Image (cartoon, coloured by chain):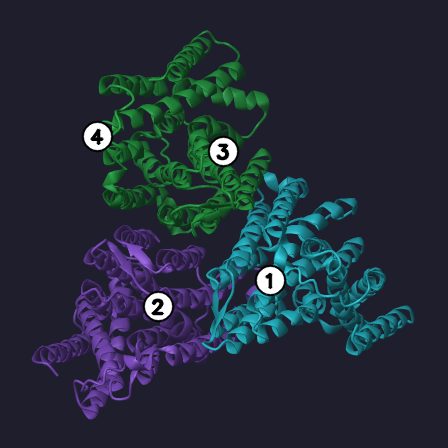
Chain colours: A cyan, B green, C purple
Amino acid sequence: MSRRTRLLLGGVAVLSAVAGVLHYTGAPSVLSFVVAGFALAGIAWVVSFTTEAVGEHFGPAVTGVLQSTLGNLPEFFVVIFALSAGEVVVAQFSILGSIFANALLVLGFVIVVGARASEDGVMRFSARLPQDTTTLLMLAGFIIVLVGISSNTHDRASDDIVTISAITAVAVLVVYGLWVYDYLRSEPAGAETGATPSSPLRTSIILLALAGTGAAFVSEWFVDELRPTIDQLGISAQFAGLVIVAIAGNAVEHAVGVVLAAKGQADLAISVVKNSVSQIAAFLAPALVLVSLLFSEPLTFDLAPVYVAAFLLTVIAIWQVTGDGEAWAFEGAALIATYVILAVFTLYE
Amino acid sequence: MSRRTRLLLGGVAVLSAVAGVLHYTGAPSVLSFVVAGFALAGIAWVVSFTTEAVGEHFGPAVTGVLQSTLGNLPEFFVVIFALSAGEVVVAQFSILGSIFANALLVLGFVIVVGARASEDGVMRFSARLPQDTTTLLMLAGFIIVLVGISSNTHDRASDDIVTISAITAVAVLVVYGLWVYDYLRSEPAGAETGATPSSPLRTSIILLALAGTGAAFVSEWFVDELRPTIDQLGISAQFAGLVIVAIAGNAVEHAVGVVLAAKGQADLAISVVKNSVSQIAAFLAPALVLVSLLFSEPLTFDLAPVYVAAFLLTVIAIWQVTGDGEAWAFEGAALIATYVILAVFTLYE
Amino acid sequence: MSRRTRLLLGGVAVLSAVAGVLHYTGAPSVLSFVVAGFALAGIAWVVSFTTEAVGEHFGPAVTGVLQSTLGNLPEFFVVIFALSAGEVVVAQFSILGSIFANALLVLGFVIVVGARASEDGVMRFSARLPQDTTTLLMLAGFIIVLVGISSNTHDRASDDIVTISAITAVAVLVVYGLWVYDYLRSEPAGAETGATPSSPLRTSIILLALAGTGAAFVSEWFVDELRPTIDQLGISAQFAGLVIVAIAGNAVEHAVGVVLAAKGQADLAISVVKNSVSQIAAFLAPALVLVSLLFSEPLTFDLAPVYVAAFLLTVIAIWQVTGDGEAWAFEGAALIATYVILAVFTLYE
């Protein structure tokens, strides 16, 4: 492990400790919230980093499975604590926000940087992963659109949104499982580098366990301070979820995608972002819908019409931009602009 | 004609006779309905089979035209009898159900089987037919979406849904006609095998006539028993149309697509299913809208919002999955899951 | 300048003068409107023609920039005068109509003619421009859909449609600027023919200035006579905007696209139409939203639900038809049919 990594790990630990102290000593909410947000962003990075380090000892398939299940641990805890605090809107918009932040903002920057890094101004990558991501997102989108319309037109099915959400969540999870199985099996085995793993297995597992535990604690403090912060700043819960929580939970973690794009590793950059998006939409979200059945106010696929449309259009937009395996800088800018438009909207909600 | 075919033909004849007896002797509705359903599925297969046999005597172009017009005779009769019984919802959902069953369920199975049959797990086929089907479905979808929104927002055009449906139906039929003309003309003439047709022309025509007549009778019994069956089982008319009628009218007939996929004949398998979908959406549906003007309650393109969205998303989903000429098993699973989600929905309507 | 061009220029001048005389002498509205419409169509052609002639003196990049900004001068004036007369619906539907007329009607004819002109019945062109146009249209569509849904569901953001429209208009303009910059830079410099420009620079600039001034006057007369004509003929403002104004402002000007397609110049034909569509949607429309803040009733992205859906489906349809760089005649027919369906709809509004 490099000196720089050790320093960063120490920094995240200190930040998390400070967030805890501020939370339990009743410091001003906004301050506690901001510190917890930075700590959470740091922990998200540690989870991502240690998951990979553990995987290095077992080969790409295991790394893939680990990343597909543990990669969004911080988002998972944020949503669970939001649900247990009865904040269903915050819970929903944290998930949605993670999808939008990754699919529009992070992907947009990856494309702008990747296209500028390429000699002829075009970022080129395999079209398969973008196509697969689109298929998984369309499936989730199908449920979201149907549930959203049913709920808004108050048809008969709208009385059974919780049941319908749970049953259809299982359908999405099955398809996601099949995809992960197919995808990992078809990955070239030669992708395994045979290089010496950067840190011993025991260290990596301990770090992962610590990061997981840290994520659980810091998420709770973060969610606890969210409502007073929203009220104090006078911003909408939608803006908080879609912009603030989403960037805290994803932006730092996925800065790595932008770095990879700058280095010209287009395929890897795209796969970091795309896998994260499909994971949240087709694994984390349906899994949380099922887990949330244990809470008094369960999570469903029922969203306000504006966000149903925003989800569907985002799916179509990223398909259109990346589905042909080529992306120009202005296409990345269009995705970033789409995110800005959405953020402007939530400001006025 | 093989011994097996003769046996199956005999079986369909017996089943149809039993359906007639049950219907006229006032047997319990559910029993009569189930037997009529199986008989109808059998007749759908006979129509498909004899249409091809007649076509063999004239070459692929004539086969194409025959299949494009007669291929959905059973669905045609079901809808006509449903309309004459004043069951507009059943009529609409029979058509919609045929589209969904073919485009999602049958196509999904074709892809799963075809991808598994391929050595590298990818089913490959010409992208042209899927693209053409998408164009035709988008055109039908344009009307459905506009009419659906107009009707639901009660704007001024909503008073003229019947007229608008009729005029726009003509537009779709013209485009469908141009497509059939272009498509048949561009088919390689060498596709004609020159093999001896499997049965004499006269036999085939007689069988087709018998099957057509049978379809007319059995459809009427089937529709007659539908309403009491729905009421007795307590299921929604939507579920009956989308799932039961659709599978009776299509699933057996199109099992042939799955068989072709298993044999590695990817292009043929895709074309059986795709042609059927575009035929129903861009020929049968608008034709029925025009024919239905003769009834007191005409058929229109006006659907409940949930089904408008389901139609549009289905068009986009099958375009996304098949438009690139490649399909993985998980994509087939995603289409099947989409059908399951829709079926779950109709259960609660 | 050829004799034919001089004659046509003279004709447009005479037509414009007649339109002025009819307007100021209080001739019957329908007559004044029709003459002003033809004069406007002629002026649109002169603007398009002189813009190119001026550009010829500076190379393709300058031509591109000129065409991207001045190309829709007549539409610009029509919308400005409609807004200053308080006719917000006419203003909106003139812009929308220009998009639909170009994207569906003109593009449809270009494809039908281009496919027929090709030996194997397939029109082939570079897929890049259609993909770029789709990206720009999707961005505009994202705003239109979000604003439309917000306004129709009366959520909180619906009170701030004017502000949201203005802010998001800036986002679209920035992306359009980046696209023009990228697009012009990547155009092969060799596209410059080096041929002697067809007329001296001074003549071209004078003609362009005259055409611009003419456009301003004739647009005002055209808009002035529009409302009495609508009332007299009993047609809807939507039909007037989507069909009559759109065809006056675009059809003649873009007949050039159809001519190019007939000559087998597929790429050029597609680019004339596509550039015009993205220019109106991603430059003219957001620019007018900003300019209109000066008027008492500003222009926003808020449309009736039917037209929101029509816009989105049009974007998806033209992407589907042209995104693969190939188009068959029936696909062109499908686009024309889509326009007809939309026109039928507006007839009943």
- Looking at the rendered image, the quarter that the N terminus of chain A falls into is bottom right
Q: Position of residue B41 (x, y in %)?
A: 43, 23
Q: Chain under label 3?
A: B
Q: Residue furthest top?
A: B25
Query: Which amino acid type is marked by label 3?
Result: Leu
Q: Chain under label 4?
A: B
Do the numbered discs 2 and 1 sit on residues whose CB atoms are within 8 Å?
no
Q: Residue furthest bottom?
A: C202
Assess disc 3: are there few (<14), some (14-19) or many (≥20) residues with their C-alpha within 10 Å of its C-alpha. many
Residue picked out by circle 1: A271
- Looking at the rendered image, the quarter that the C terminus of chain A falls into is bottom right
Q: Residue furthest right?
A: A25
Q: Position of residue C156 (x, y in %)?
A: 60, 63
Residue C160 visible: no
Assess disc 2: are there few (<14), some (14-19) or many (≥20) residues with their C-alpha within 10 Å of its C-alpha. many
Q: Quick one: C61 or C42, which is closer to the camera?
A: C61
The quadrant where residue B275 appears: top left
Residue picked out by circle 3: B242
Q: Quick one: A160 or B31, which is closer to the camera?
A: B31
Residue picked out by circle 2: C277
Q: Earlier in the sequence, mark 3 or mark 4?
A: 4
What secondary structure is found at the residue carrying circle 4? Answer: loop
Q: Position of residue C144 (x, y in %)?
A: 47, 64
Q: Nearer the viewer, mark 2 or mark 1?
A: 1
Query: Which amino acid type is marked by label 1?
Result: Ser
Q: Is disc 1 on the same chain as disc 2?
A: no
Calculate the distance from the C-alpha at mark 3 to the C-alpha at mark 4: 36 Å
Q: Residue at x 70, y 71 (%)?
A: A252
Disc number placed over residue B58 in the picture, else none = 4
Q: Is residue B73 left or right of residue A246?
A: left
Calculate the distance from the C-alpha at mark 2 to the C-alpha at mark 3: 39 Å
Calculate the distance from the C-alpha at mark 2 to the C-alpha at mark 4: 46 Å
